[in-house]
Amino acid sequence: MMIESMAISDEALEEIVQNVSSPIEMAALIKELGVPFSAKYLSTTDYVDHYNTSFKMAYSLGVFGADLGYLNIYDKSTQIVDYLTAINKLADGVKVGQFFDFTTLKRLATSRENIDSLMFISVNSFNNMDSYLRENNRGHLSALMIAGTWVEGMYLVTQVANEKSNPELAERIGEQKINLNNIMLILNNYKEYEPVADLIETIKPLKDEYDKIEITYNMGEPETVEQDGMVLIVQKEESIVNITDKQLNNIINKTKQIRNKLISS
Amino acid sequence: MILILIFLSAPIFSQFDTDFIEQCSDKSGEDATYLKDFQVVLAAAQPNHVPPVARYPLVLSKNNIYRFSIFTAEESEGKAILQLYDSNKLIFSSYDKNTGEEYNPFNFMCQKTGIYHVFISFREGKEGQAVGILSYVTK
C-alpha cells in the first residue's frame, strides 16, 4: 500500500531504475547449475508484427532482450538472429533503433567470430535504449521495457526451478522480491497510462505472493583475500530468503500465467 | 571553512563512445561478462570543498562474484578511484590513499542481495574522465 501511494522524484526514479538487476545474472546462474539450454523457455518471435502499439512494442522489447541474454549466455548464436531481427523491428517501432546496431550484431552472431563482443553490444544497446527513453520523456516505455525484461527473466528461472528442484534457485527466485518492489515503484509512477495501469493489475497477484516472503539478514564484516593475483572481498554479512515450497510453487504458477497473458495480449 | 560534500548522480548522457567502453570491458578479463558501465566526467574540486564524487546505485545478488574495474581516460588530469559502498559503509576502494596501493580491478563475492553504490572520484580532486565497469565473474 505504501509503495502505491508514493510520489517519486525524477532523481529517485532514476536510482530505482538502476536498482533492477540484469537478466544476464539469472541466465548465467541457470547455466552454472548445469541446466541444458531449452528453446521452449523462449518467447516466440513469430508474432512480432502483431505488436502494433508503442506500449506493446516496448514491453516486447524487454521480453526479447531477456531471451537474447539467455541465448547469449548459452552461445546460441544461430538462434540469436531471429531475436535480433525482432528486436530491431521493435526498437525502430519505439524509435530507439539508432542504439541497436543490428548489422554488427547480426554479423557477429552469424560469423561467431566474437561472442564476447556480441554479448557486450547486446547488453550495452539495451542500456542505451533504456537511458534514451527516460531522458526523452518516454519513461513509461522504459518502465514497460524493464518490466518485460524482468517478467521474461522470471519465467526462464521459474520454469527451470519447476523442472529442477534446487535451493539456490529457490533463494534467487525469492530474492526477486527486491526487484519486483522496484519495478512496481517504477510502474506506479506511470500509472496514468492505461497500459501501465493494466500491467500493474496483471502483476499484482505475483506481488501479493512476494509480500509473504521474508528476507532476513546476518551481520558480519567483509574479509579481503588474494585469489589468482586479484583482490577478492568476501562479504560476511548475509541475506537469507525464507521461502516455502508452497510459496515457490505459487510464484512459479503465477509467473507463468502472467507471462503468457502478457505476451499473447 | 565550509565543506560541502558534492554527490553527483549518474550522468544522463553518454560521455564515451561504445568502442572505448567495449575495450574497457574486454580488459576486465575473459572470465568477466559485462553488465553495466559508469561513465564519469568530473570537474576539479573547488578550493575548500570536498572533491566531487559520482554516485551510482546498483543491485548485487547473493552468491555472485562481481568484478569492478576502473579505466581513466588518457586525457584525464586525475586518476580515477572506484569505491563500493553498502549503505553508508565503505566495502572496498580501488585505491588506498595511505599506502598508495592500487587494486584495479577487484572482485566482490556478494552474500547479501540488495542495493549497493559505486562512488567514482579522482585522486587529489583533480578533474577527470573515467569509465567504471561492472562485470559478472563466471565461477
Image: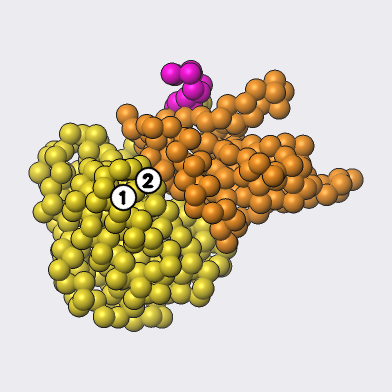
Chain colours: A yellow, B orange
Q: Nearer the viewer, mark 1 or mark 2?
A: 1
Q: Nearer the viewer, residue A28 or B84?
A: A28
- Label 1 vs label 2: CA separation? 8 Å
Res. A188 visible in picture: no
Helix, strand or loop for disc 1: helix
Amino acid type indicated by mark 1: Leu
Find disc 1 in the rendering and name its residue.
A108
Task: Indicate whether B134 appears above or below A206.
Answer: above
Q: Chain of mark 1?
A: A
How far across and how far down the image is residue B21, in percent? Answer: 51, 47
Left or right position of A224 against A30: right
Q: Residue shown at 64%/37% (left/top)? A: B81
Which of the two discs, 1 and 2, labels the residue nearer the N terminus? Answer: 1
Q: Is residue B46 magenta?
A: no
Label 2 chain ID: A
- Residue B123 in picture, x, y percent from top left: 72, 36
- Looking at the image, which is closer to me, B125 or A187? B125
**Magenta part mainly helix, strand or loop?**
strand
Range drawn in magenta = A223-236
Q: Position of residue A203 (x, y in %)?
A: 27, 66
Q: What amino acid does circle 2 point to?
A: Ser
Along the horizontal axis of the image, is B2 left or right of A148?
A: right
